Image: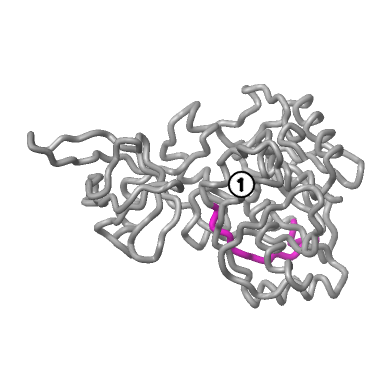
């Protein structure tokens, strides 16, 4: 398929810059087979059955955007220049692959100074980013990050307004436990205590998995033939407990419905070899596009995604290209709010 098959025109005013309050007041588009229903997340229990299992990503977003000054030594002494750093992934040795802006003039051996006693040496520059070695590791690094870091808002929000303290709450799900994401699993942003209680009363069950969402989720697809696109890699885990819970639901006839594309991707990764969801941990670069054979999931709760994105391709793989177009046309016509802070959908093939 061609990249143009996944394009659509979105009015800028439909890009949500803040979430609604309360979280479960977001609008909900339900696609059940060929039928489209318009509702709100508070009514989500009405569209699920007792014995269904929602699978939730428990990753926690770190304040991964840092602002510092590059220090360069020369014959004329020290010179400084402002640098914006976004953490992408750690290597386990106190070093991080990062995106630096501006990065063109950075050189290995230079130092970037931040507030809070944090600094980083530039190890090397490569096609995937700039590798930095920080002077702090472990709890000390986490504490410095909490003090001076900013939430890494998606580019389409950051281009329209800066991150602020409110985003530290708004851009974190109620399930966030395991630090490591640099982007939120945004389908879970619609959930709050009241909705969880209503779902439990309905007889819906819950399982947690982990996928540390990387900044690569926002990278544009640059090839015309989508089969040529290479996905970014992200670390995830399906624990033995999660696998057992899902197997029990399967055995009793319940549906497995991931909350978010990240939960779906890790489940389909775990089931890729055998068709059964088994305990699994590691890096996944699974690319789900039309033609993909789903082995693990019976539906999906997700937000409305960017044109020409791999996430839109995933939705199209699950419910079909034509139904996806119908859904997005209906969402635009009815002025649903799009992207990370926007409204969402329940998609049942």
Residue 216 relative to residue 263: left or right? left
183 w.r.t. 283: above or below: above
From the viewer's side, name the closer residue of 315 and 18.
315
Q: Position of residue 98 (x, y in %)?
A: 40, 48
Q: Residue at x 32, y 49 (%)?
A: 147
Evaluate whether residue 207 shows in this view: yes
Q: Is residue 206 magenta?
A: yes
Q: Quadrant of the N terminus?
A: top right
Task: Give the extent of the magenta segment.
Answer: 199-213
Image-quadrant location for residue 282: bottom right
From the viewer's side, name the closer residue of 53 and 72.
72
From the viewer's side, name the closer residue of 21 and 19.
19
Image-quadrant location for residue 275: bottom right
Count of marks, rendered view: 1
248 w.r.t. 191: above or below: below
Evaluate whether residue 203 shows in this view: no
Q: Position of residue 109 (x, y in %)?
A: 23, 50
Q: Judge the density around disc 1: few (<14), some (14-19), many (≥20) Cα neighbours within 10 Å.
A: many
Q: Residue at x 47, y 58 (%)?
A: 180
Q: Which residue is mark 1?
A: 186
Residue 67 relative to residue 205: left or right? left
Q: Residue at x 44, y 36 (%)?
A: 163
Q: Secondary structure at mark 1?
A: helix
58 w.r.t. 305: above or below: below
Residue 248 relative to residue 134: left or right? right
Q: Position of residue 337 (x, y in %)?
A: 67, 31
Image-quadrant location for residue 249: bottom right
Residue 94 relative to residue 14: left or right? left
Q: Is residue 36 magenta?
A: no
Q: Residue at x 36, y 47 (%)?
A: 125
Q: Residue furthest right?
A: 34
């Amino acid at each position: 398929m061609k990249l143009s098959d996944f394009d659509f025109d979105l009015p800028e005013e439909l890009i949500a810059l803040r979430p609604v309050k309360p979280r479960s007041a977001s609008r909900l588009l339900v696609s059940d087979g060929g039928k489209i229903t318009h509702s709100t997340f508070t009514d989500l229990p009405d569209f699920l059955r007792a014995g269904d299992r929602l699978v939730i990503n428990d990753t926690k977003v770190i304040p991964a955007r840092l602002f510092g000054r590059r220090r360069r030594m020369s014959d004329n002494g020290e010179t400084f220049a402002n640098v914006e750093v976004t953490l992408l992934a750690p290597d386990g040795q106190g070093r991080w692959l990062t995106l630096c802006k501006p990065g063109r003039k950075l050189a290995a051996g230079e130092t970037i100074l931040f507030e809070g006693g944090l600094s980083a040496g530039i190890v090397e520059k490569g096609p995937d980013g700039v590798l930095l070695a920080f002077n702090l590791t472990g709890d000390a690094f986490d504490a410095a990050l909490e003090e001076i870091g900013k939430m890494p808002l998606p580019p389409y929000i950051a281009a329209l307004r800066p991150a602020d303290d409110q985003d530290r709450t708004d851009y974190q799900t109620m399930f966030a436990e395991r630090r490591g994401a640099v982007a939120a699993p945004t389908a879970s942003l619609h959930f709050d205590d009241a909705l969880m209680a209503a779902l439990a009363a309905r007889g819906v069950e819950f399982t947690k998995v982990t996928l540390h969402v990387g900044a690569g989720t926002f990278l544009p697809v640059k090839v015309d033939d989508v089969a040529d696109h290479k996905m970014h890699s992200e670390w995830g885990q399906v624990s033995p407990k999660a696998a057992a819970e899902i197997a029990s639901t399967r055995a009793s006839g319940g549906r497995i419905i991931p909350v978010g594309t990240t939960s779906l991707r890790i489940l389909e990764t775990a089931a890729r070899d055998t068709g059964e969801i088994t305990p699994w941990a590691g890096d996944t670069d699974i690319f789900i596009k039309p033609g993909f054979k789903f082995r693990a999931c019976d539906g999906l709760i997700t937000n409305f995604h960017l044109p020409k994105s791999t996430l839109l391709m995933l939705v199209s793989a699950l419910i079909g290209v034509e139904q996806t177009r119908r859904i997005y046309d209906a969402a635009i016509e009815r002025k649903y709010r799009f992207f990370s802070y926007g409204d969402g959908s329940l998609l049942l093939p």
